[in-house]
Amino acid sequence: MSLSFIIFINHVKSIILLYLFFISLCLTLWIKLIIVFLKNFLSTLSTTKYIF
């Protein structure tokens, strides 16, 4: 294996790791947003139920 090839492989690995990290971050953020939205939605549903 040549040195440049090894460096290239390491570079690709780091890029893939960064990409995966970014995806997981986005996923957790989306999940938190969805949970918050659902909680708000359910609370509004329950309050409107009491009103009617």
Image (tube, rainbow, N blue to C red):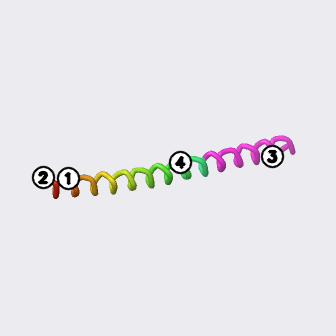
User: Distance from label 4 to label 3 (Cα)?
Assistant: 30 Å
Q: Is residue 20 left or right of residue 12?
A: left
Q: Which residue, given by chain and number where applicable, does mark 3 sit on?
A: 6
Q: Which residue, given by chain and number where applicable, does mark 1 sit on?
A: 48
Q: Which mark is residue 17?
A: none
Q: Residues within 10 Å of mark 3 (few under 14, many from 20)?
A: few
User: Distance from label 2 to label 3 (Cα)?
Assistant: 69 Å
The answer to which of marks 4 and 2 sits earlier in the sequence is 4
Q: Which residue, given by chain and number where applicable, does mark 4 sit on?
A: 26
Q: From the viewer's perspective, is the residue at label 4 or at label 2 nearer?
A: 2
Check the image and name the residue furthest to the right: 3
Magenta range is: 1-19
Q: Which residue, given by chain and number where applicable, does mark 2 sit on?
A: 52
Q: Amino acid at mark 2?
A: Phe
- What residue is shown at x 21% (from left), y 57% (from top)? 46
User: Distance from label 4 to label 2 (Cα)?
Assistant: 39 Å
Q: Nearer the viewer, residue 31 or 5?
A: 31
Image spot of residue 1 (x, y percent): 82, 45
Image spot of residue 45 (x, y percent): 23, 53
Q: Please, what secondary structure does the residue beneath circle 3 have?
A: helix
> Residue 11 in magenta?
yes
Residue 47 found in image quarter: bottom left
